[in-house]
Image (cartoon, rainbow, N blue to C red):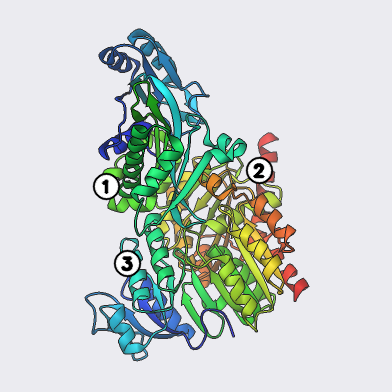
Amino acid sequence: MNIHEYQARDILRRHGVPVPPGEVATSAEEAERIAQRFGGAVVIKAQVHAGGRGKAGGVKLAQDAAEARSHAERIFGMTIKGLVVEKVLVAPTEDIASEAYVGVIVDRGTRRAVFMVSREGGIDIEEVAAKTPHLIRKLPVDPRYGLLPFEAYELAVFLYDDLPQQRACAKILRQLYTAVIESGASLAEINPLVTTRNGEVKALDAKFNIDDNELFRRPGIAELRDTSAEPAAETRAREAGLTFIKLDGDIGAVVNGAGLAMATMDLIKHYGGEPANFLDIGGSSNPEKVVAALEIITADPNVRVICFNIFGGITRCDDVASGIVEATRRLDIDVPLVIRLTGTNEEAALAILEEAGFSATTSMDDVVQRAVEMAAEQATRAVG
Amino acid sequence: MAIFIDENTTLLVQGITGRDGSFHARQMIEYGTRLVGGVTPGKGGQTFENGNGGVPIFDTVELAVQETGANTSVVYVPPAFAADAIMEAVHVGIPFVVAITEGIPVLDMTRVHAFVTDHGARLLGPNCPGLLSPGRSKVGILPGPIATPGQVGVVSRSGTLTYEVVYQLTRAGIGQSTCVGIGGDPINGTSFIDCLAAFEADAETRAIVMIGEIGGTDEQEAAEFVSTKMTKPVVGFIAGQTAPPGRRMGHAGAIISGSEGTAAEKIEAFEKNGIGVAQRPSDVVGLVRDVL
């Protein structure tokens, strides 16, 4: 789950990390009032779940409250990487002397949370990694002990020369580690971690990704989810227990299991078609999931045919078949369905489908080829 | 022979009274797995009925091992308690634990991994379908009927895509020594390389099918292992060639691993190391025939 910068800053603040003041506005008038209250120059920052906000024009410096309002007016309603800006963060400007990067990522290779720090902050860390990898230091944390004081200090010495700043930074790193553990983050970045002209070390910008699997035990974190900041279809899918990613093609796909779903998309492409989505109905499916899946897919006007590829294991084919029949009764589906079902309770599933007037195959190649052919036919008909 | 499980495997099911645990316990017994006991706290002393005398249920893994001498455990416990269940089994001295549970927090898995390593045990999973040595033993949720005994080892990160490939092999008359699903979570116990090394050492396995997907660098490292440490032929498939760039870990994860983990990178690593790559899942059959 993604959370906004202002929410990540709140988490850091709660763990003792020095974070400069800042408030969220949902309108230009509110942004103006906040700027008025702070007095002096402020930064207006778009709150969207996307990187590169600055480059997209979503971060602006305003000298006074009136300018804050006009910048906010422009930023609201902006679309950054397909996401509409609905909130901005208004924060007083800081007198910055240096900018560092600090990140914590759960790493598959070392199977640990890994700290990654660099004196080159404020910019894309990818760029630093590509051009000057020696300016990045990494440290895998042993989960038995957590980030030890001397480890935090070693990283701090890599970042700062001044002893009080090294000590302040080491403290921040340990607080950040605690914040990661207690919020269930799979990624946390402070970029930049700044020093001010009077020598303070502060977290200016923060980004946290929360592991979805943590949410059941962290209600306070779970309620940070901002459904207005994600595509509606993805919200609907998540609520139904499905994983859905929209793509640009015209062949809808309903598959059980992420690997088979990807392989189905690949096969659609292989036979010359274009997938309209990635959709995994997961294991232990009940008919309701299939209904929700069809509802989401048919909401996409580009879809010309829907291809089911189900290999029953934990998922029972008869459940999926019942879902298909139920969905076609309840929804107004005007695109053809092509169906492949194999595995657990396959015979029962084929009987259910046959009775409702559907046919099904047991071969993945067959079903995808048919879907591609039918999409092409429908496209020709639409043009003709 | 086979890898990790065979007719000498004696199995405990942790979470045997749950919905998934009870369903699959029956399936495993039906397949012929030597299922010797179940564990569900608070239900010790009861019997898991399977129409064939039943299986004793214990409150703890410790009591179950004392009574049954089980050498393998499979975990169907819900995500909130699964990390603890894995560590409980390992702590009692069970050398091989298979975790089916999906949704275990990844930070829990960093601790579980350290714990399992410290105890010298092997964990398969989590979020995996388990494994199947056709005709001998099945641990997990793989559908038994799709497999048939033979000489091809199958290792995969996926669940249903594994079934697809195994099903195609079986229909083409190519049997399997063991089919292993290592699971798709960022942190798991047994890697591709662990499985490849085991297949290399297994006298019965003559060729291996490796099924990977986008994300991480496990496939690339495994490809390197194949060309430097193995004598048996390996063929592969990578899912996700058309997947949009991942949104989960962002770029920072890729910097740590030094790779974006795309399908193209993995296919290139396979081909460079002499691993034939199937274009479609159904092409795996032809590639296997060529190397047998």
Q: Tell me which residue sits at (28%, 49%) in the image.
A: A218
Q: Residue at x 27, y 81 (%)?
A: B58
Q: Tell me the number on the disc at residue A219.
A: 1
Q: Is residue A89 left or right of A381 when viewed as pictured?
A: left
Q: Secondary structure at mark 2?
A: helix
Upstream in the sequence, badge 1 or badge 2? 1
Looking at the rendered structure, the secondary structure element under dot 3 is helix
Q: Residue beneath label 2, please?
A: A378
What's the CA distance linking mark 1 and mark 2? 47 Å
Q: Residue B117 versus residue A379: which sits nearer the camera?
A: B117
Question: Residue B211: horizontal and vertical position, in percent?
Answer: 61, 63
Q: Is residue B221 visible?
A: yes
* Residue marked by disc 3: B84
The residue at 38%/19% (across/down) is: A95
Using the image, name the chain to which the residue with label 3 belongs: B
Residue type of the residue flagged with mark 2 = Gln
Mark toward the viewer: 2 or 3: 3
Pointer 1 indicates a residue of which chain? A
Name the subunit of mark 2: A
> Is B27 situated above or below A303?
below
Above or below, A179 relative to B29: above
- Identify residue type, mark 3: Asp
Of the 4 image quadrants, the one containing the C terminus of chain A is top right
- Specify whether residue B248 is in view: no
Residue type beneath disc 1: Pro
